Image: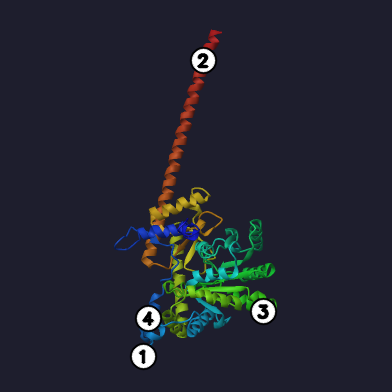
Amino acid sequence: MKLLSTKATCNSHGQDSSYFLGWQEYEKNPYDQVQNPKGIIQMGLAENQLSFDLLESWLAKNQDVAGFKRDGKSIFRELALFQDYHGLPSFKKALVDFMAEIRGNKVTFDPNHIVLTAGATSANETLMFCLAEKGEAFLLPTPYYPGFDRDLKWRTGVEIVPIQCTSSNNFQITESALQQAHEEAKKKNLRVKGVLVTNPSNPLGTTMSKTELNLLIDFIKDKNMHLISDEIYSGTVFTSPNFVSVMEILKERNDKDFLDANVAERVHIVYSLSKDLGLPGFRVGAIYSDNDTVVAAATKMSSFGLVSSQTQYLLSAMLGDKKFTKNYLSENQKRLKKRQKMLVNGLQKASISCLKTNNAGLFCWVDMRNLLSSNTFEAEMDLWKKILYEVGLNISPGSSCHCTEPGWFRVCFANMSEDTLNLAMKRLKDFVSNTNGEECSSDNKRTRSTQASRSFTRKSISNWVFRLSSRDHHEQEER
């Protein structure tokens, strides 16, 4: 008799992905400017550390809130005692208003339709439990966030079928790719329950166009399925084109009577404060849906991963300060733009380019195909290992994101200081220079070897011809 469950002993968590393996190697040998200057620099972590001073400044000015006080009196007892899983009304109102502000107040959100979860990981998994049965499938455009293999599949038993996107159109979703993925699922006898996208994209760092969003809505309307739009990077858009939420598209179509009511009930949004506000440790996520049944079921499930009352109280005050949120969003986007430019310029000095449509996120989708020894995923892994162990940079290989083309990598830029980023770029440039130098040296060696071989061949042929001529001469004499 087995003492442990299949779930406990199976290997379907995705922890053996190179995405997570890189993290493990970093943790064994983390870079520190003083203690470990030759250690591995973490560029595989999409974390926003650029605007912590703004958050800390607000806390310093609002010490009553940080000290769990209201009007100078402690409310610690009130916050510490039991709270139900619906969440604090003040926080839910502040959160939906913040979401609307990020979207330029072009759309509004009803606090009664939001479900609080312990981060976006919990939100995505909860939606899987609500929308699909074990063995059913969701379509995801490639490349996609490696953690989805864990978040969507591990405990739910839901399958992922990739929508194959390519660099030929900057990895945008096409109708043919959607249809092809749907057909692939049917061949595998998988019932497709919906499509999940990240907008802005992780790992591409791009925003979806209105054309793509309309295509997705038409697709789910035609196929009678769901659409999940993970919009946790919505506040990180630092240059044009601007972010367009799927909610804006629904509103536009509804205004023009192009939308059936039940289609809106099959579109769901995932959000979190981990990226836009840089608070992954606070574990604040949310599901927004116009489907009452989904909201009710997800609310019940949220009891397995609640947001603490203390966190809700603190953030309700912070997000309720409109002067602060307006300044934070503007300043944070400026800092992201500056930092992304630093990364792009550093990569260019190493003759490496990024996806040109990168306008959002905490990372760039980097093209290192010119550094591959061959156009294979084996060569990609060889390059990744060299960059990890020899260069000392942990970046995420495209294969871990299920990219269809070898040689692409996700490189993060917002989780380190400028000095650390500059050092990372210097290491990479030196590596590329040395690699090119070795190739040139190898080419020269091959050239010299070829020339020597040709010289040897010419001499050999000459000697062979001479011997042949002598032999012929002797043979002629003998005859």
- Given the image, on which type of amino acid does mark 4 rest? Ser
For marks 3 and 1, the one nearer the N-term is: 1
2 vs 4, front mark: 4
Residue 352 drawn at (x, y percent): 47, 57
Among the 4 quarters of the image, the one containing residue 413: bottom left
Residue 44 drawn at (x, y percent): 44, 62
Left or right, residue 417 beside residue 458? left
For marks 1 and 4, the one nearer the N-term is: 4
Quarter of the image containing the C terminus?
Answer: top right
2 vs 3, front mark: 3
Left or right, residue 313 beside residue 355? left
Mark 4, Cα crowd under 10 Å, few <14 / some 14-19 / many 20+, is: few
For marks 2 and 1, the one nearer the N-term is: 1
Q: Which residue is mark 1?
A: 72
- The correct choice, above or below, for 378 with respect to 333 in the image is above
Q: Which residue is mark 4?
A: 57
- Given the image, on which type of amino acid does mark 3 rest? Asn
Q: Residue at x 38, y 91 (%)?
A: 71
Q: List the single residue furthest toward the bottom.
A: 71
For marks 3 and 4, the one nearer the N-term is: 4
Q: Nearer the viewer, residue 422 or 21?
A: 21
Residue 353 drawn at (x, y percent): 49, 59
3 vs 4, front mark: 3
Whether residue 242 is visible, yes or no, is no
- Given the image, on which type of amino acid does mark 2 rest? Arg
Assign a secondary structure to mark 3: helix
Q: Which residue is mark 2?
A: 471
Q: Which residue is mark 3?
A: 254
Whether residue 93 is visible, yes or no, is yes
